[in-house]
């Protein structure tokens, strides 16, 4: 009986220790993260928050605040109102052109997260089959709009005479197709899974064309990098832990996504996360590769959103993504 009692006590003690925070509350650094908008594409940040990865690295992130746009999110960082922002790396370049000192430090969404859907009766075997079709896409200068323009150009089609393109607010691309007023929709998640659940089919996958594409990055100020590199390192390490968990335990990522987007159908959320993991939209690690950066910038240049050179070495600070993850603050 004594041995059983000791075993139960040991189990109870182990359980208690397992539920203790990794870092004492008085040793936590409270930080604010500002995102361009609330999106499934930023799920690695939400997983780091809900699954305790930030806390494991001595970071208290009470809120992830949506700013409404990439420039606004980064402006909050440059003003010292928040420490990190989530959006495309091109906004770092735009800020630098105006004198803002910022850097992209970690990947978040790292392949082109856009899919093309159509009604079942629409025949499509290659981009050349866009000819004569009515296509619905989000407003320029969004990436879905840019990728469609690149696709039309590569197929040597004219967007004025060969393809009828209708721009709509992001998130409303499916309606005209489901109603039969258009043939094809170009969309992000979770609209892709919503379309599939309503009888549409995927006819083209941009993640396969651009498996490395710096769609969204973690960004911070040069001032924070210089004054507190340990804080920056810990934040990037937490994102790295989050990405690792998402790939090894996708059910935990799906649970966080359902919590963050409670108004969406749970099955839609689960399949959207699964598809983005499979397509490496959520990358295996935090590194922003030169190829991913160059692909994203080249696409922005193609449509004229970027008119000057944006160089990897000027915009990306890679050293935090190559530092070994230390397993948290002790």
Image (cartoon, helix red, strand yellow):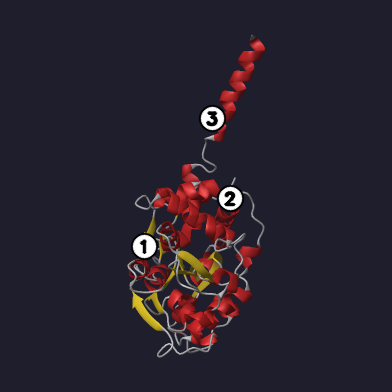
| Residue found 35% across the figure and 79% down from its top | 166
Above/below status of 56 relative to 114: above
Q: Which residue is mark 1?
A: 66
SS at mark 1?
Answer: strand
Numbered circle sitting on residue 245:
2
The front one of 140 and 221 is 140
Image quarter of the N terminus: top right
Whole-percent x and y of residue 61? 44, 53
Sequence-earlier tag: 1 or 3: 3
As measured in the structure, the alpha-carbon distance from the residue carrying label 1 to the one carrying label 3 is 35 Å
Q: Residue furthest top?
A: 1
Q: Which residue is mark 3?
A: 16
- The residue mark sitting in front, 3 or 2, is 2
SS at mark 2?
Answer: helix
As measured in the structure, the alpha-carbon distance from the residue carrying label 2 to the one carrying label 1 is 24 Å
Numbered circle sitting on residue 226:
none
- Disc 3 vs disc 2: Cβ atoms closer than 8 Å? no
| Residue found 56% across the figure and 34% down from its top | 18
Left or right: where 313 falls relative to 307: right
| Residue found 54% across the figure and 61% down from its top | 232
Q: Is residue 96 visible?
A: no
The front one of 271 and 95 is 271
Whole-percent x and y of residue 282? 55, 61
Above/below status of 53 relative to 160: above
Left or right: where 304 falls relative to 282: left
Whole-percent x and y of residue 110? 56, 67
For residue 70, what is the image quadrant?
bottom left
Sequence-earlier tag: 3 or 2: 3
- Disc 2 vs disc 1: Cβ atoms closer than 8 Å? no
């Amino acid at each position: 009986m004594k041995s059983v009692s000791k075993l139960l006590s040991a189990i109870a003690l182990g359980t208690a220790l397992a539920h203790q925070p990794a870092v004492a509350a008085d040793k936590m650094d409270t930080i604010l993260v500002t995102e361009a908008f609330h999106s499934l594409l930023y799920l690695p940040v939400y997983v780091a928050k809900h699954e305790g990865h930030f806390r494991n690295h001595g970071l208290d992130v009470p809120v992830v605040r949506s700013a409404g746009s990439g420039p606004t999110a980064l402006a909050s960082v440059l003003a010292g109102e928040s420490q990190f922002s989530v959006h495309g790396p091109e906004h770092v370049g735009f800020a630098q052109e105006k004198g803002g000192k910022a850097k992209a430090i970690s990947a978040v969404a790292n392949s082109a997260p856009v899919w093309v859907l159509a009604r079942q009766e629409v025949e499509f075997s290659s981009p050349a089959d866009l000819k004569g079709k009515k296509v619905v896409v989000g407003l320029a200068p969004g990436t879905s709009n840019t990728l469609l323009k690149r696709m039309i150009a590569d197929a040597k089609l004219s967007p004025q005479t060969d393809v009828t393109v209708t721009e709509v607010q992001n998130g409303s691309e499916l309606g005209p197709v489901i109603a039969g007023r258009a043939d094809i929709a170009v969309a992000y998640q979770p609209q892709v899974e919503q379309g599939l659940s309503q009888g549409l089919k995927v006819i083209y996958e941009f993640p396969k064309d651009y498996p490395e594409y710096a769609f969204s990055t973690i960004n911070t100020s040069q001032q924070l990098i210089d004054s507190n590199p340990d804080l920056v390192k810990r934040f990037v390490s937490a994102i790295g832990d989050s990405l690792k968990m998402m790939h090894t335990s996708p059910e935990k990522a799906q649970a966080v996504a359902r919590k963050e987007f409670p108004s969406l159908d749970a099955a839609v959320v689960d399949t959207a996360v699964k598809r983005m993991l499979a397509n490496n939209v959520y990358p295996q690690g935090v590194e922003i590769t030169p190829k991913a950066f160059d692909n994203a910038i080249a696409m922005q240049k193609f449509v004229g959103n970027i008119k000057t050179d944006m160089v990897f070495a000027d915009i990306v600070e890679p050293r935090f993504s190559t530092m070994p993850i230390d397993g948290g603050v002790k």
